[in-house]
Image (cartoon, rainbow, N blue to C red):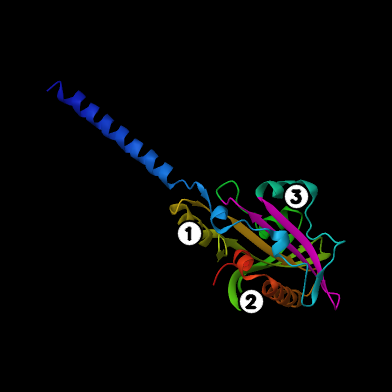
Amino acid sequence: MSDIKPRVTSRRAVIATLLMACGSAAGWQLTPRTPLASVHGELDLEKAVPKAFGNWQMDPGARAGVVNPQQEALLRQLYSQLVTRTYVSREGQRVMVAIAYGNDQRDGMQMHYPEVCYPAQGFQVRSNRAVELDIASRKVPGRRLETVLGNQRFEPVTYWTVIGKTAVRGGFSKKVVEMGYGFRDLIPDGLLFRVSTIDRNSDRAFAVQQAFANEMMQAVAQGPRSRLMGEG
């Protein structure tokens, strides 16, 4: 009887060791090692996004966005490419564009959303709603924010995000897509496309942003377009 307990304890220890070893192997196996960007090709935002199209032309003397140097340094760490531009229409309308691309969307390198970035810069987010955007004959899941700085700068914002070639609205749907790539041994890349205008009239601003984004995406070549707005 005295030998039974040590044997049982020893057997349990062996089983526990084997289970831990299997768990470690499974965890290693499920850790993606292949960058998705290397599979579907690198994306060059500067070349892919036209500087002039339809009714719009880039203003080379203007800076888009409201990012201070410290925050911009952080964005450069998170994203492998960051394009910020201001476009002007023939009628004098101005649209600010920020496109951020990261070739690694694993934890710690996640994209920063406007509803987080804007308050960090002193803005108040007065509304945040999910929308389906009509872009280049596609329905793209996105969001529209109403933001204001000091009750003086009213800046409505429209944005969407893409993981790999799938447009997502963030949260759970983003995690599902990332996990799907992970099970295929792929490290997902991600892109955030943001447009904004300075306008107290949010409905008018969102209409301008919708028309602008639609016209821009129609002017982008088919290959880069699937990376910028996802595939249908």
Point out the tag, 1 or 2, that comes first from the N-terminus.
2
Residue at mark 1: 176
The quadrant of the image that shows the C terminus is bottom right
Say if the magenta span includes residue 95: yes
Residue type highlighted by circle 1: Val
Count the labels in the image: 3
The residue at which mark 2 appears reads as: 136
- The reply to whether the C-beta atoms of the residues labelled 3 and 2 are less than 8 Å apart is no
Q: Residue furthest top?
A: 2
Note whether 137 is above or below 23 in the view shown: below
**Which residue is the site of mark 3?**
72
The disc labelled 2 sits on which kind of residue?
Answer: Ala
Secondary structure of the residue carrying tag 3 is helix
Residue 19 seen from this side: yes
The spot of residue 81 in percent (x, y) is 69, 54
Q: Nearer the viewer, residue 189 or 152?
A: 189
Q: Residues within 10 Å of mark 3 (few under 14, many from 20)?
A: few
> Can residue 129 be seen?
no
Q: Main secondary structure of the magenta part?
A: strand
- Whichever of labels 3 and 2 marks the residue nearer the N terminus, that label is 3
* Residue range of the region highlighted in magenta in the rendering: 79-105
Image coords of residue 140 (percent x, y): 59, 71
